[in-house]
Image (cartoon, grey):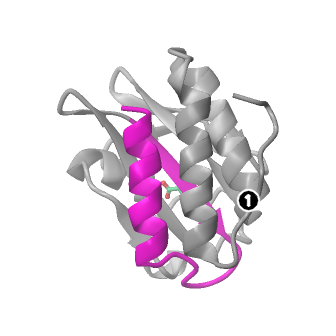
C-alpha cells in the first residue's frame, strides 16, 4: 500500500469507513505489531486530531507504553488501575465521558476530558489496549466504539 493516508469522508462514520480500509491494507503485509501500532496511531491522529492516541502493551503483569502520538504519557499501568487497566482486566471497551468522574483515572495530561480504551484480544487474551484521549468532554460515541473495536481487531 502507498504510504500516503487519504483522509476522505463527509462525517465521522465515512472517515472511519475510509480509514479502516486503509489500515487493513497497511497492516496486511506487515507482521510486526509495534510497526503496525505506530502507523495506526499516526493514521488516527492525522484523521481525527485526537489529543493523545496510542497503545499500551501487556508485558508480564503490567501495561507498558507503546507507540503513540501526543504529549508525554505514563510508562506503566497495573492491571485494574485507571481506564486502561480496567479495560485490560475486564477485556472490554471502556468509554469515559468525563475523566474526573471515573474513580482511579490516571491523569497523564490535565487537558484530557474524555477517553476511550479498547482492548486488543488475541487468542482469548488481552495483549494490548488502544487508548484515545480528547480535550473535549463526551467526545466518544457508539460510532467511535464500533470502528475503534474494528481497528483493534485488525491487530489481533
Ligand atoms: N488515562 C489513562 C492513562 C493513560 S494516558 O491517558 C495516556 C488511564 O486512566 O488508564
Q: Residue at x 49, y 68 (%)?
A: 144
Q: Which of these two is toward me, 38 or 101? A: 38
Q: Is mark 1 within 8 Å of ligand 1?
A: no
**Magenta part of the chain:** 128-156
Quarter of the figure that contains the N terminus: top right
- Residue corresponding to mark 1: 47
**Res 50 visible:** no
Residue 153 drawn at (x, y percent):
37, 42
Which quadrant of the figure contains the C terminus?
Answer: top left
21 relative to 8, above or below: above
Q: Is residue 72 visible?
A: yes
Residue 7 drawn above or below residue 100: above
- Is 72 left, or right, of 155 in this rendering? right
Residue closer to the observer: 31 or 99: 31
Foreground: 123 or 107? 123
Tell me: 12 left or right of 88. Answer: right
Q: Crowdedness of circle 1 by 10 Å Cα count: few (<14), some, many (20+)?
A: some
Counting from the top left corner in percent of width and height, residue 77 is at: 46, 41
Q: Is residue 68 magenta?
A: no
| Position of 80 relative to 122 (above/below) | below
Q: Position of residue 47 (x, y in %)?
A: 73, 59
- The part of the image, by quadrant, that contains residue 39 is top right
Picture coordinates of residue 97 (x, y %)?
A: 49, 81
> Residue at horizontal 36%, vertical 46%?
119
Residue at 57%, 33% in the rendered image: 25
Among the 4 quarters of the image, the one containing residue 66: top right
**Residue at the location (70% across, 47% down)?**
43
Amino acid at each position: 500500500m502507498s504510504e500516503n493516508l487519504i483522509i476522505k469522508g463527509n462525517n465521522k462514520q465515512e472517515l472511519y469507513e475510509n480509514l479502516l480500509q486503509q489500515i487493513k491494507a497497511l497492516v496486511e503485509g506487515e507482521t510486526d505489531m509495534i510497526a503496525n501500532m505506530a502507523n495506526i496511531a499516526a493514521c488516527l491522529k492525522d484523521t481525527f486530531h485526537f489529543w493523545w492516541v496510542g497503545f499500551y502493551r501487556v508485558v508480564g503483569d503490567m501495561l507498558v507504553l507503546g507507540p503513540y502520538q501526543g504529549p508525554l504519557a505514563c510508562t506503566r499501568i497495573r492491571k485494574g488501575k485507571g481506564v486502561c487497566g480496567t479495560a485490560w482486566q475486564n477485556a472490554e471497551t471502556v468509554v469515559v465521558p468525563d475523566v474526573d468522574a471515573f474513580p482511579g483515572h490516571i491523569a497523564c495530561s490535565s487537558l484530557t476530558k474524555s477517553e476511550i480504551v479498547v482492548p486488543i484480544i488475541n487468542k482469548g487474551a488481552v495483549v494490548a489496549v488502544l487508548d484515545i484521549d480528547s480535550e473535549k468532554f463526551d467526545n466518544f460515541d457508539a460510532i467511535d466504539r464500533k470502528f475503534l473495536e474494528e481497528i483493534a481487531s485488525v491487530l489481533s
